[in-house]
């Protein structure tokens, strides 16, 4: 029996804590059954071994969300702590020695200045910003002397054809460590994406730092342990900064979203054996050059590397920088950088190429067998000056040729290598990433699959779940879900790794529950929630994309139900899964502002009747109906049930905006009631009973208005879409006696549609649950196992290795849609697989109470999997054999589980190992 998985701010042995009351958690591992924590004690010591906090013996079972309550923590200091636990079985457990280090608490801790090069000559690239939000047609842009055409585009959803380029800037200096270094920490951030090296070695294996934030409001810095890199005596340090999110062509293809000049802020603190500190900063002592081998680096366009320009490693002491220029500096301004506590993005898997082949149109293409987000590593041996282009794409077209819908635009995903020597060289881009399975290679010859490796990149969130069952196609679906999740968690949660790389909030609303089964997302999501709060508009609206991208002109100053709801759904999920009440308190003000903005939106009366919407104008409704309109969503724009497969454009592909206009009144009103319910629940949890009662009553009033305006006496909706029925049932928008009528009609619609999905973002997460809940489980299983378009397994049948954005991304006739093929939103079914097929359900807080409740009538012979909760690992397997089922597994210590049997009765399991056999038509066999 022992203590494990001890974390501070959800990270093990963090060196970047910048809060005064960090939170701790731990797990108890026990071989015996029914072990519970009776009491705990934590002692924290500073570097002088002086106790700064002794919690005393706390007689509680709490192992999560334990907040530090000791002396004020000091900047850049090391603290050691130990945990003691007493159990109900009489054991006293002691953890090993753990530590955390603090970063900077005060602005004055920063001694560094911003350093940057003299800017290269260029004309304004962003017409929106430069014209002060008035459109201005710009036909030419000068970037480092190269002409660049920029097309004025009418369609806001289309990428602009545009060429770069600015080279990455290199900055370096030499310094002397006066005495042998005992501890060295590097604090660094940048305007752009940086790579720092000391004495020829990179300070980290992480990528794409400092990550994506709205740089004018929030900037994160990272902390690195560089004990092994700094040597006694002479040292050299270099930092390379590329455009990244700060200056690159993000979103709709405009550059310089947050600024025009790359720069870095860097502070190296070294402590010798006597405790004396020496500080090396970014300041006037650095030099810079634009003449390095990275000739351009853009997150969307790709990276160009000219190996002929490589003249040595600038972080080596001997490097000749005589031609380099002195940097310019300026003092730190807002925003003040904040330490990044959440995990960094890294290469989490290397995927070898499966084949290299020539397509029917004569092009050389590499197939990695898996769609992913990342870059490639390639071995090249060609003549000096040979240019090789690597274009990344997700699909082949119907003829087997390379296909990438955004080729030739500002999202081209092209990496270029120009050979510098005749020997074998290695090309591995560092300042970009792409979404791809296939790479088209132009240039070079005699390519072999052994020359290529794909480097899959994702934020290093711990994998916590796995699921398998007797159906291999469902297992492939689970794999697709997992890969889409990893591909779209790169510094922030994104929609896709190709077209936008944007933090669309609605995707997390629908997918968050699944994400939290697959990985521990706590620190990652809490970090993003901070950006959501900072980007929230003064009128209370939560934006559709966070961080805010100002050239997304379609967002304006409004918010959409189903998207802005993330400020409610995500903190509540984190609290329920991890017991983190602080996340509710930190976001409570933003939640209230969001709710008030939606109340105002509902209160506004429509100026004219909206087709299919059920809304009425003041001129054509009675007094009661007029009052009801003030509790319904029937004005403004909301995304509704985004991307319904039966709502198509002229080309026959799914039409997202049309789906929104068709459904936003019904969907928006259902979500308004759901939001009010959630906010009422959260208000009660944080102790605001006035708001709890107010919003409970408000939710019920919205339901009254919905039923009176949108629902007929025979239980039909004015607009008969699957999603409208699903959400009305999910959020109980009708009286209990009418719910069976709506459920019956929903089932009829699904059956009539051939057991195929006709749902968009908001309804898809709930369709299987709702069908099962109201007695139509057979229909639910037929929907899950459906192999015709649109369905989950249709994608598997088509060879998908990730989840598609559109159900019809590949039509049955083979035509490809102009959409993303790596979009996790419709992977939200993963939550159902864990909860209902495998049967692991959280009925307490932080899985302190667990319900094991598989749907025994599911069409699978067996299922098995694990979920590593904040209290420990839950293992489960069940298997059917004729008329009985065997259920076995392990429940973590300090929790208790209950098993639901096929006949509906429940058996208390406690915790530890269990094995139960039960009849599928009766109770326990043995």
Image (cartoon, rainbow, N blue to C red):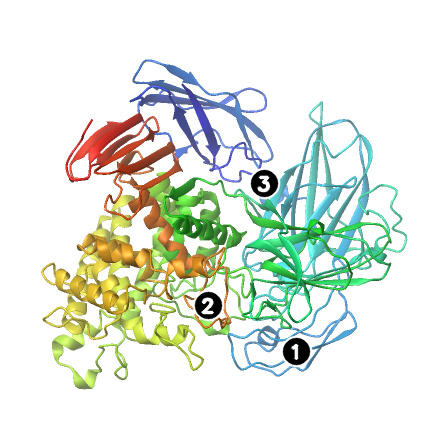
**Mark 2, residue position:** 809
Q: Given the current orientation, which residue lies at the most extreme bottom position? A: 619
Looking at the rendered structure, the secondary structure element under dot 2 is: loop
Identify the element where label 1 is drawn.
Answer: loop
Q: Quick one: label 3, few (<14), some, or many (20+) residues within 10 Å?
A: many
Tell which residue pokes out farthest to the front in this image: 882
- Front disc: 1 or 3: 1
Residue 330 at x, y percent in the picture: 71, 55
> Image check: 631 left or right of 348?
left
- Residue 752: x and y in percent read 24, 69
Specify the quadrant that holds the N terminus: top left
- Is 229 positioned to the left or the right of 626 in the image? right
For mark 1, does the 10 Å Cα neighbourhood hold few (<14), some (14 to 19), or many (20 or more) residues? some
**For mark 3, what is the residue?**
104
Above or below, 865 relative to 657? above
Q: Quadrant of residue 765?
A: bottom left
Image spot of residue 668 (x, y percent): 29, 67
Label 1, label 3: how far apart the Cα atoms are: 43 Å
Whether residue 580 can be seen here = no
Q: Which residue is mark 1?
A: 150
In the image: residue 723, left or right of residue 806 = left
| Placement of the C terminus among the 4 image quadrants | top left
Residue 771, position as x, y percentages in the image: 23, 57
Does residue 640 sit above or below 438 in this rendering? below
x 56%, y 69%: residue: 397
Which mark sits nearer the N-terminus, 1 or 3? Answer: 3
Residue at image position (52%, 22%) is 97
């Amino acid at each position: 029996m022992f203590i494990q998985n001890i974390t501070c701010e959800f990270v093990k042995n963090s060196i970047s804590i910048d809060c005064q009351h960090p939170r701790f958690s731990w797990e108890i591992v026990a071989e015996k059954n029914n072990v519970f924590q009776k009491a705990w004690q934590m002692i924290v010591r500073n570097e002088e071994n002086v106790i700064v906090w002794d919690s005393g013996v706390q007689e509680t079972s709490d192992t999560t969300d334990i907040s530090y309550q000791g002396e004020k923590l000091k900047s850049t200091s090391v603290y050691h702590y130990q945990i003691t636990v007493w159990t109900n079985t009489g054991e006293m457990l002691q953890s090993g020695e753990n530590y955390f280090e603090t970063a900077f608490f005060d602005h004055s801790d920063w001694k560094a200045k911003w350093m940057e090069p003299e800017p290269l000559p260029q004309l304004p690239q962003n017409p929106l910003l430069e014209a002060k939000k008035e459109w201005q047609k710009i036909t030419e842009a000068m970037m480092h002397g190269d002409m660049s055409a920029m097309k004025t585009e009418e369609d806001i959803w289309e990428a602009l054809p545009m060429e770069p380029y600015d080279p990455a800037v290199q900055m370096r200096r030499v310094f002397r460590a006066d005495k042998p270094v005992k501890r060295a920490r590097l604090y660094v951030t940048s305007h752009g994406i940086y790579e720092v090296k000391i004495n020829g070695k990179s300070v980290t294996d992480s990528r794409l730092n400092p990550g994506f934030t709205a740089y004018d409001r929030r900037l994160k810095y990272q902390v690195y342990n560089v004990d092994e890199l700094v040597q006694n005596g002479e040292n050299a340090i270099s930092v390379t900064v590329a455009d990244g999110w700060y200056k690159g062509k993000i979103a709709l293809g405009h550059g310089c979203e947050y600024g025009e000049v790359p720069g870095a802020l860097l502070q190296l603190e070294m402590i010798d054996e006597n405790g004396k500190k020496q500080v090396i900063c970014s300041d006037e002592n650095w030099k810079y050059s634009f003449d390095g081998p990275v000739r351009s680096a853009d997150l969307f366009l790709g990276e160009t590397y000219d190996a002929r320009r490589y003249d040595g490693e600038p972080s080596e002491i001997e490097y000749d920088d005589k031609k380099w220029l002195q940097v310019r500096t300026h003092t730190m301004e807002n925003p003040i950088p904040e330490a990044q506590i959440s995990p960094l993005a890294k290469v989490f898997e290397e995927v070898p190429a499966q084949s290299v082949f020539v397509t029917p149109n004569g092009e050389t293409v590499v197939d990695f067998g898996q769609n992913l987000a990342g870059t490639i590593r390639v071995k090249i041996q060609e003549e000096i000056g040979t240019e090789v282009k690597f274009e990344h794409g997700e699909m082949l077209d119907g003829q087997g040729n390379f296909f990438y819908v955004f080729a030739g635009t500002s999202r081209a995903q092209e990496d270029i290598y120009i050979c510098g020597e005749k020997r074998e060289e290695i090309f591995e881009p560092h300042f970009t990433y792409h979404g791809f399975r296939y790479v088209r290679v132009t240039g070079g010859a005699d390519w072999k699959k052994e020359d290529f490796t794909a480097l899959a990149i994702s934020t290093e969130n711990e994998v916590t779940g796995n699921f398998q069952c007797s159906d291999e196609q469902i297992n492939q679906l689970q794999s697709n879900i997992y890969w889409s999740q990893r591909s779209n968690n790169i510094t922030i949660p994104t929609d896709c790794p190709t077209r936008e790389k944007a933090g669309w909030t609605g995707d997390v609303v629908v997918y968050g529950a699944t994400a939290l089964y697959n990985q521990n997302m706590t620190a990652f999501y809490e970090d993003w929630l901070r950006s959501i709060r900072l980007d929230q508009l003064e009128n209370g609206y939560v934006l559709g994309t966070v961080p805010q991208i100002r050239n997304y002109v379609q967002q304006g100053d409004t918010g959409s139900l189903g998207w802005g709801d993330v400020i409610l759904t995500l903190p509540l999920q984190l609290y329920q899964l991890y017991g983190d009440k602080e996340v509710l308190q930190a976001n409570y003000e933003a939640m209230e502002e969001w709710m008030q903005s939606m109340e105002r939106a509902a209160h506004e009366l429509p100026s004219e009747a909206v087709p299919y919407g059920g809304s009425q104008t003041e001129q054509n409704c009675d007094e009661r109906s007029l009052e009801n309109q003030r509790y319904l969503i029937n004005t403004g724009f909301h995304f509704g049930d985004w991307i319904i497969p039966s709502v198509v454009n002229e080309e026959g592909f799914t039409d997202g905006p049309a789906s929104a206009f068709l459904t936003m009144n019904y969907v928006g009103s259902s979500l308004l009631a759901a939001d009010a319910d959630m906010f009422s629940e959260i208000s009660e949890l944080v102790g605001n009973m006035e708001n709890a009662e107010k919003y409970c009553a408000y939710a019920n009033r919205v339901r009254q208005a919905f039923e009176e305006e949108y629902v007929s006496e025979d239980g039909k909706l004015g607009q008969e879409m699957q999603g409208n029925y699903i959400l009305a049932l999910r959020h109980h928008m009708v009286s209990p006696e009418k719910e069976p009528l709506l459920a019956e009609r929903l089932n009829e619609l699904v059956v009539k549609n051939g057991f195929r999905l006709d749902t968009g973002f908001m309804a898809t997460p709930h369709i299987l649950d709702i069908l099962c809940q109201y007695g139509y489980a057979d229909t639910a299983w037929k929907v899950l196992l459906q192999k015709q378009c649109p369905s989950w397994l249709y994608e598997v049948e088509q060879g998908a290795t990730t989840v598609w954005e559109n159900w019809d991304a590949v039509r049955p006739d083979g035509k490809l849609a102009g959409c993303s093929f790596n979009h996790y939103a419709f992977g939200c079914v993963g939550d159902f697989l864990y909860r209902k097929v495998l049967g692991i359900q959280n009925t307490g807080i932080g899985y302190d109470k667990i319900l094991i409740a598989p749907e025994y009538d599911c069409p699978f012979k067996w299922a098995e999997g694990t979920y590593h909760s904040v209290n420990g690992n839950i293992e489960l397997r069940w298997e059917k054999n004729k008329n009985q089922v065997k259920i076995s597994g392990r429940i973590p210590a300090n929790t208790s589980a209950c098993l639901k049997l096929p006949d509906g009765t429940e058996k208390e399991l406690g915790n530890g190992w269990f094995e139960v056999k039960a009849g599928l038509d009766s109770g326990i066999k043995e």
